[in-house]
Amino acid sequence: MKTGKLHLTTALLTLLANSACTSAQVTDAPNQQEALRQEAPVTPVAKDTIPFGAECLIACYPQFVKGYKDNCLILSDGSTLVYDDGQQKTHTQKMDNADPEDMFSQPYDTNVWHPKKNYDPGRIRNEAIFKHMYGKNKQKVLSQLVKVDWFGQKLLFTAVNGAADSLRTVAKDLAATLPPTYQKYFSQSSTFNWRAVRGSNRLSAHSYGMTIDICTKYSDFWRWSNPGKEEEDDIRYVNRIPHEIIRIFEKHGFVSGARWYHYDTMHFEYRPDLLRFSQHKKN
Ligand SMILES: [Zn+2]
């Protein structure tokens, strides 16, 4: 059932992309408001202005996302991917059927430690773009994994987009910055696993090889702490991972599941696109 759904989604995306990358006008409302506040002359937004999220994808993944035209991302194999499908979606619908634009609907705020309801920045992912970059199936992803030394473990991580190098830098920085007592948080870590998100049909970010779970013994997952609760329910927030650890991962391009309302505090995912987007939105 899961595979069928994924195939259908891919087929639909391909169909949309091949038929017409329609130029649904994307306005840049926050920038316009900013310009008005400063009483500077307002420059008309050109019809083919690149949305900032698309710019971040191009900047962070230049090998795979080559450009943007008429509401479409232009990918390295010459195919196109509709950037904004124009659909209004609930939070759950965004996660189940995200276009690339939806991935940036929640900037990742590094000041938030108690996320408000449904604040899950990074949890909304367009599957097509990640499959294009990291591999469309388990074998393809596996073929691009390399070993990373991680506190006595050898973990498999993707070499694509410099993700493995970034994880190596995280390990060095954690070891150099934090006292040895913190090493308990890094034991029995895990990375690649081609699987669905627990309790859903969506492909987990672990499938792409750019995600690590650190020690579960000191971690919390919203479903474990809130038995019987579902996505739409109010839940209780718990996190025991020290903030210093989260900051170091973030410094090197990873987002943390401890920032999510639907928390997964062991989970760190290589998402320089979202960090870049959020950093610029803040300034
Ligand atoms: Zn995880």
Image (spheres, helix red, strand yellow):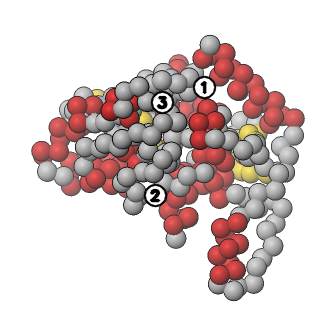
Q: Which residue type does callout 2 highlight?
A: Asp
Q: Position of residue 239 (x, y in %)?
A: 29, 44
First in sequence: mark 1 or mark 3?
1
Q: Residue 127's image quarter?
A: top right
Q: Residue at x 75, y 84 (%)?
A: 41
Query: Does the closest atom of ligand 1 sit within 8 Å of the Cβ of label 2?
Result: no
Q: Quadrant of ligand 1?
A: top left
First in sequence: mark 2 or mark 1?
2
Residue 142 visible, this angle: no
Q: Residues within 10 Å of mark 2 (few under 14, many from 20)?
A: some
Q: Residue 13's image quarter?
A: top right
SS at mark 3 in the image: loop
Q: Residue 50's image quarter?
A: bottom right
Q: Position of residue 230 (x, y in %)?
A: 48, 30
**Residue 169 falls left or right of residue 127:** left
Q: Circle 3 sits on which residue? A: 230
Q: Residues within 10 Å of mark 3 (few under 14, many from 20)?
A: few
Q: Residue at x 17, y 45 (%)?
A: 182
First in sequence: mark 3 or mark 2?
2
Q: Circle 1 sits on which residue? A: 136
SS at mark 1 in the image: loop
Q: How many numbered marks does the figure carry?
A: 3
Question: Between marks 3 and 2, how big is the CA–CA gap?
Answer: 24 Å
Question: Between marks 2 and 1, how big is the CA–CA gap?
Answer: 30 Å
**Residue 214 falls left or right of residue 98:** left
Question: Between marks 1 and 3, how big is the CA–CA gap?
Answer: 29 Å
Q: Circle 2 sits on which residue? A: 109
Q: Residue at x 65, y 22 (%)?
A: 6
Closer to us: 75 or 9? 9
Q: Which residue type does callout 3 highlight?
A: Glu
